[in-house]
């Protein structure tokens, strides 16, 4: 059996005071390779802190976070940055696309700092865009794309580095219900292909797409 992609061993985060504020209480969680997890909770519950920890954007102040078998407490900042770039693909509510760059160029830029050769970057970008159904829009600027197409470009950008984990933060938050459904169908397809997916959401309809849902309330992770 393969190692889990995510292992949280009593990992939590407390901001120093005075007074101290515990944003995420120590929690234990394992996410297996190929799993599809949705994370729900009200605003201020700790979802963003949870996302920042598993996305290697924040370090836990207690416990350990193991990503793909690598204990992230044992590596330095440069190694964390490299690990994040290689192993985690991010998809956000706001698409974060450069308006003056084509769809293909936006996807290529995600690999710019990974020492991927230019020709390989282009090939991977085109493959990723075809994978999300945008093979016919490679040269289109974001301003000429619909909201759903822009989110598909963002997903292609996240996939281009061939990550172990796709981490989505409210991926349908800026989309109408029909477009949101098509994006969720795309995530379903990626999951069927074996991608490990974690989606942060406040929408019960989105949460139901996952194989299991985790609730965060008052900084407590309730599996």
Image (cartoon, rainbow, N blue to C red):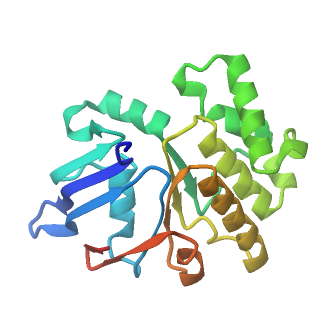
Q: Position of residue 196 (x, y in %)?
A: 50, 52
Count of number-bearing discs:
0
Q: Look at the picture and state if 20 lies above or below 79.
A: below
Drawn side of residue 2 relative to residue 66, left or right: right
Answer with the quarter of the image where residue 103 lies: top right
Q: Is residue 100 visible?
A: no
Name which residue lies at 57% across and 49% down: 194
Name which residue lies at 84% across and 40% down: 138
Q: Nearer the viewer, residue 191 or 217?
A: 191
Drawn side of residue 144 relative to residue 206, left or right: right
Q: Position of residue 153 (x, y in %)?
A: 72, 49
Q: Quadrant of the N terminus?
A: top left
| Outermost front residue | 1
Drawn side of residue 68 relative to residue 136, left or right: left
Q: Position of residue 200 (x, y in %)?
A: 48, 67
Q: Position of residue 65 (x, y in %)?
A: 26, 48
């Amino acid at each position: 059996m393969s190692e889990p992609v995510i292992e949280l061993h009593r990992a939590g985060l407390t901001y120093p005071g005075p007074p101290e504020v515990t944003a995420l209480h120590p929690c234990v969680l394992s996410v297996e390779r190929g799993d599809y997890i949705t994370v729900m909770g009200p605003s201020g519950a700790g979802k963003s802190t949870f996302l920042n920890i598993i996305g290697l954007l924040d370090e836990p102040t207690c416990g350990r976070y193991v990503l793909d078998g690598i204990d992230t407490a044992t590596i330095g900042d440069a190694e964390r940055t490299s690990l994040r770039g290689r192993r985690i693909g991010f998809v956000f509510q706001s698409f974060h696309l450069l308006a003056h760059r084509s769809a293909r160029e936006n996807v290529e830029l995600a690999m710019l700092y990974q020492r991927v050769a230019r020709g390989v970057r282009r090939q991977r970008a085109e493959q990723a865009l075809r994978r999300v159904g945008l093979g016919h829009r490679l040269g289109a600027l974001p301003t000429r794309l619909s909201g759903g197409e822009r989110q598909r470009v963002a997903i292609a950008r996240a996939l281009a580095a061939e990550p172990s984990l796709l981490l989505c933060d409210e991926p349908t938050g800026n989309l109408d219900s029909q477009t949101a459904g098509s994006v969720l169908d795309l995530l379903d397809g990626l999951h069927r292909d074996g991608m490990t997916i974690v989606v942060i959401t406040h929408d019960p309809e989105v949460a139901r797409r996952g194989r299991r849902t985790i609730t965060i309330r008052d900084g407590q992770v309730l599996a």
